[in-house]
């Protein structure tokens, strides 16, 4: 799962800013249903994208980029540590 690509998708759909004066759309976001190391079946949802109705106008390639942010392998992958440090 490429977190940078996911963040870029959210930003381009209005959930982030390029400049301080940009307006945030607080309804935009991504909820991950799967994490690195989880098994997944074909056509099984791995994320829920919360986006405005005009998402395809704002960012025509968002679905293509969303799918490109996930790499599926037939070889099991070791899960990553989700919390690296607690301060």
Image: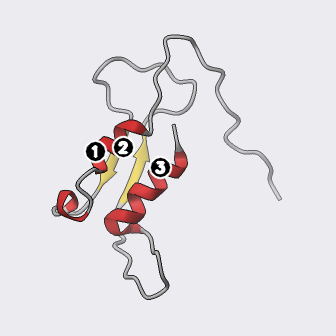
Quadrant hosting residue 70: top left
Res. 5 mark: 3
Image marks 1 and 2: residues in contact by CB distance under 8 Å: yes
Taking the image as drawn, is residue 2 in sight? yes
Which residue does the numbered mark 2 point to in the structure image?
66
> SS at mark 1?
helix
CA gap, disc 1 and disc 2: 5 Å
4 to 44, vertically: above or below: below
Q: Residue 43 in the image: state x and y as whole percent.
A: 28, 23
Label 1 Cα crowd, 10 Å radius (few <14 / some 14-19 / many 20+): some
Which residue does the numbered mark 1 point to in the structure image?
63
Quadrant hosting residue 41: top left
11 vs 4, left or right, is left
> SS at mark 3?
helix
Q: Residue 16 in the image: state x and y as whole percent.
A: 44, 70
87 to 47, vertically: above or below: below
CA gap, disc 3 and disc 1: 12 Å
Say whether disc 3 or disc 2 marks the residue closer to the N-terminus. Answer: 3
- Residue, far bottom: 21
């Amino acid at each position: 799962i490429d977190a940078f690509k996911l963040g870029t998708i959210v930003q381009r759909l209005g959930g982030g800013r390029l400049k301080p004066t940009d307006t945030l759309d607080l309804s935009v976001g991504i909820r991950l249903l799967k994490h690195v190391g989880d098994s997944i079946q074909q056509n099984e949802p791995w994320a829920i994208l919360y986006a405005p109705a005009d998402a395809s106008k704002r960012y025509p390639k968002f679905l293509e980029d969303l799918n490109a942010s996930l790499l599926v392998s037939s070889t099991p992958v070791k899960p990553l540590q989700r919390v690296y440090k607690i301060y």
